[in-house]
Amino acid sequence: MKKTFLLFLFVPALFFSCGQTDKKSDTAAAGRDSVMAADHYYMQYQGTIGGQPVTMHVVRFGSTYDVNYTYDNDGQIRDLLFQKDSLLKNDSLFFTEFAPRNAGNGQEDTDPQLRLVIHPDRIDGFKRIGEKDPQPVALLASRNGNAFIPVGYLDSIRLTGFKQDTPSAFTSLVLLEPGGTTTPQHWFTALIKRTILATQKMDSTSLQTAMTQFGRSFIENFRDDVDTMKASGNGDEAPVSMMHYDQQISSNLVYNNHGYAVLSVGNYAYTGGAHGMYGQTMLCLDMKQQRELTFRDVLTIDSATLQPILEHHFRARYKIADNKPLTEILFDERLALTDNFYFTPGGIGFIYQPYEVAAYAFGLIDVWVPYADLKPWLQPAFAQRMGI
């Protein structure tokens, strides 16, 4: 999960060449949408990396990729950061893997590198860790899981006429929505509007329309802020370097099987100040019943029992000895509980946003708990569907 913030740092440069200069956003955005429509998809792949079974999720939107995978024997998420300048012979793509590192697991500190050739029906390539021999990657598109399609909105603007700099704004929104059906999934659109786009306007507009409105509002708010700066008479003296606004939302699935889908949505926003803010929202979906799962749909455990289990795995993941206080990383002596959770075939993870339980410098806090440590409290219906 630590990929999220680094990914957002790379993306703006990829799209500003398509941006506009002091013009309305409608035309440029519509043009890009029509060009990119034929080049986007979500696909789940299954196969092996180095002979070990894996499941990989790929979202392609235009020239960008969002990729993660799990080894079937542990279920922990490995995020891949796409290196845009690494295209080789127009097919092979270069990714850096951010793998989970638990204390005492013997894993090297070197981030693995992957060279992948990604097609809608298969993925070939290799994975290399340091100087070790490369591990072959061989994956095929899977028929398991629910169909999803990416929906996107991209726009940018530059405002000229300033002596010191050129204020700019960029918005990139890519979200998945259920596909493969002619019936609108209103429940899903309403959920995304409420939890991701933060709007209470629960009308019948499509997800594409809602995202377009969301993106355009950001651009117009940027215009208003620049106009306010000009009107104050500080246009030339003000810190124009803080007027490079940036808004990004990306999404991918981390699990998609047995009628469940776990959607991971990353967000980043900068509207001036020392740094931007980012986070990761996990949505656990029951696609059969068309609803979001709550924590109680998965576990029956009470908070008093769960907290020491979380703290044990937090110490292991972040290498804090039992005789050391949790305040070496956390604000408090205890790890607070969160309902921002996700699951895969191997266990359940809990995500804490920057500033939620620790300083911004520690980034997202991701605590992973294997099912083996939670089995007595698994909801029977959930365990049966997952085959646990």
Image (cartoon, grey):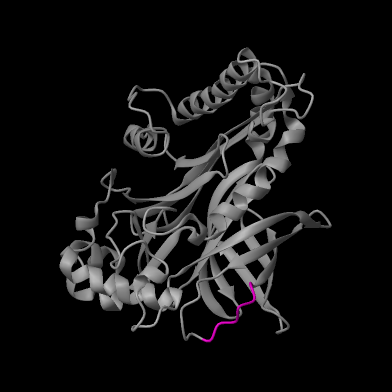
User: For residue 144, what is the image quadrant?
Assistant: bottom left
Q: Is residue 266 left or right of residue 227?
A: left
Q: Position of residue 359 (x, y in %)?
A: 45, 57
Please state if 378 lies on the left or on the right of 255 as rendered.
Answer: left
Left or right: where does residue 150 sit relative to residue 76? right
**Vertical side of 62 occupied by 32: above or below:** above
Seen in the picture, residue 335 relative to 236 is either above or below; the reply is below
Q: In the figure, is residue 63 to the left or right of 99?
A: right
Highlighted range, magenta = 106-111
Tell me where residue 213 appears, x and y as whole percent: 50, 23
Q: Nearer the viewer, residue 385 or 153?
A: 153
Q: Position of residue 52 (x, y in %)?
A: 54, 79
- Which quadrant would the C terminus be assigned to in this image? bottom left
Residue 308: image quadrant is bottom left
Q: Is residue 179 visible?
A: no
| Residue occupying image coordinates x 76% and y 22% | 162
Is residue 41 in view from this perspective?
A: yes
Going by the picture, which residue comes out furthest to the right?
89
Q: Is residue 139 magenta?
A: no
Q: Residue at x 49, y 61 (%)?
A: 362
Residue at image position (29%, 56%) is: 338
Front residue of this view, candidates 165 and 85: 165
Q: Nearer the viewer, residue 77 or 39?
A: 77
Q: How many numbered tags mark residues here?
A: 0
Q: Where does the image place residue 79, in percent across and percent down from the top left?
A: 55, 62
